[in-house]
Image: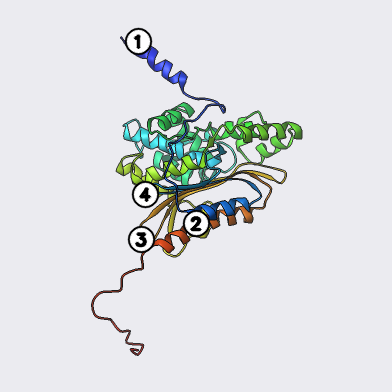
Amino acid sequence: MRLLLATLALSALLLLPSCASAPVEPLPPAPQGPAALQQAIDTLAAGFDGEVGVAVEDVGSGWVVGHDAVRLYPQQSVAKLWVALAVFDAVERGRLKLDDPVLVTRADMSVFNQPIQKLLTDKGYRTTIDGLLVLALARSDNAANDILLKRVGGQKAVWRALAAHRVLGVRASPAEQVLESRVAAVRWKPEYSFGQAFWTARDAIPMPRRVRALQAYLDHPADGAEPRAIADALARLQRGALLGPAATRRFLEILGSTDTGPARLPGGLGPGWRIAHKTGTGQDLGDLSTGYNDVGLLTAPDGHVYAVAVMIASTRRPIPERQALMSAVTRAVVALHDAAAPPLPPPSGPAILDPARPAT
């Protein structure tokens, strides 16, 4: 019997996707959202010079509007969401604790954005699983993400978490150093984690080879996800349909403290609105930028929540224009909500006069 169970478990593991060509199961159809918002999103996307996918879901009612929202877009650091999901899943199953101690060393470093590197001493840096989650999500730290990925069991463990929670239309990304080396056609070496070593190695790659590698990534992103699928998963997280109450609360709390991309989706927030979000930024080749993303949960002053994903696969437009597109999507959602929201009721009880001003 034990041999049979072990065989079945191994068979299930081997069936998990592990490459860029792995298919993703599509989401079922959702109710169509307001025509005015759909028109606004289509107009914004059509007016941007680049490959853009947008999805907006009303968390309460479930309606969706989108533009090119069911195509796989490169996630880049948006994929850290699913590593975090796997971590919280492991916590809920008793396999990890948020306060588990972690000793980070130079051997744990990755590539590109790594704020944790400044915290390293000769004896490393002592933190916890929760501390790594904050770094990975709120500060988009690649080393913190790769450490967490190892702790949960690697890319296949993230695939399992996605499958267990029915997160459809999303691929589990390989480790940051693996993905970014592949995108740049660079053979990874540990010394590339420090200084400008990775940039130097990348610059030494013949341009035709780099172009082929980047195009292959854009055509079949190993970390691909549909904007519609990301919005759906975020909406389910907000509703408490992905994780238990404690894990949901902590996940959203960390996303609410994100300090990357303040001019992206957050740039269009109205007074009293707040956001919990995750950004992603891919590599550039010449004037071509890739994987420029922001996804999150917009909460209105009255507590109504919208899940939003704006993903730019590739563009030659400058950063301010990309940020302007994202903030414009936010403004469109805010405008729709504000137009539909009932007016605030007048204050009850007797008027309280300001003694510094005469009554009129």
Q: Is residue 30 left or right of residue 322?
A: left
- Depth-wise, is mark 2 or mark 4 nearer the camera? 2
Mark 2 is on which residue type? Ala
The residue beneath circle 1 is 4
Whether residue 270 is visible to the viewer of this picture, yes or no, is: yes
Q: Is residue 64 left or right of residue 321?
A: left
Q: Point out the tag, 2 or 4, that comes first from the N-terminus.
A: 2
- Spatial separation of the CA atoms under disc 4 and disc 3: 15 Å
Q: Residues within 10 Å of mark 3 (few under 14, many from 20)?
A: few
Q: Residues within 10 Å of mark 1 (few under 14, many from 20)?
A: few
- Residue 61 is labelled as 4
Mark 4 is on which residue type? Ser
The residue beneath circle 3 is 302
- Spatial separation of the CA atoms under disc 1 and disc 2: 57 Å
- Spatial separation of the CA atoms under disc 1 and disc 4: 45 Å
The residue beneath circle 2 is 36
